[in-house]
Amino acid sequence: MGEVELSCRAYVKMYLHSCLFPRCSINGLLLSSSSAGGAVCVTDCVPLLHSHLPLAPITQLALTQVWSLVGLVSVCSPTPCALKIADKIAEQFESAVLLMLDGSKMSPDDRVPPIVMYERRDSKWVLKDKHTIMLRQWEETQAIASQMLESGDHALLVDFDGHLDDITKDWTNQTLNTKIAELSSPANGNI
């Protein structure tokens, strides 16, 4: 498996999801519009769960609602629930990845993304070389994530779990996606 490129939108949503539920084991689905030359380009993250329960029916329902799955994101260490979801994704996508946000390294001063990456080899998830994940314009992405957290925009994020509690909430996070796009646009000095 080659490199993994993570978009600003995907990282910001992962970060905000973990900040919204700091004491929970969160999970989200990683999406890609395409993979070019062996590289996996993660373009978005769909926040999935924040509950402590391995909710198989909810997860199965969520997996039928999204397309172009390339992996799973979780916080802390891989839970049995996260590993099962990642295994299901790997059945459909050979180059699937499991990304873990390292909560102990999620500070505005960190010079590198707080991400640990796993790949599936021989039916097991093994640690992957940290140099194979790319996040273009890390400083700008980090600034956008911090700005959105400080302004309270993380409250706009709705995971699939929250949507099932109140179906009027938009789990596709279109309002949040628009805000991230505005902040990361060239008009605001970003690319």
Image (spheres, rainbow, N blue to C red):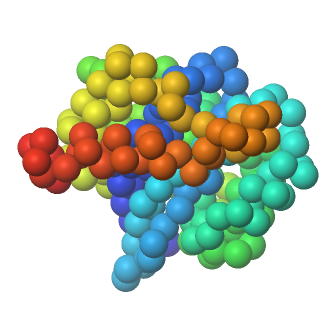
Q: What residue is shown at x 57% (from left), y 65% (from top)?
A: 70
Can residue 132 be seen here? The reply is no
Up-down relation of residue 86 to residue 182 (above or below):
below
Measured from the top left, where is residue 135 in percent x and y? 31, 50
Measured from the top left, where is residue 73 in percent x and y? 59, 46
Along the horizontal axis of the image, is 190 left or right of 90? left
Q: What residue is shown at x 57% (from left), y 51% (from top)?
A: 172
Q: Residue furthest front?
A: 168
Q: What residue is shown at x 64% (from left), y 74% (from top)?
A: 93
Q: What residue is shown at x 49% (from left), y 20% (from top)?
A: 104
Near-viewer residue (146 or 105): 146
Along the horizontal axis of the image, is 34 left or right of 76? left
Measured from the top left, where is residue 82 in percent x and y? 74, 46
Up-down relation of residue 17 to residue 172 (above or below):
above
- Residue 22: name its quadrant: top right
Up-down relation of residue 67 to residue 166 (above or below):
below
Near-viewer residue (86 or 186): 186
Measured from the top left, where is residue 78 in percent x and y? 69, 40
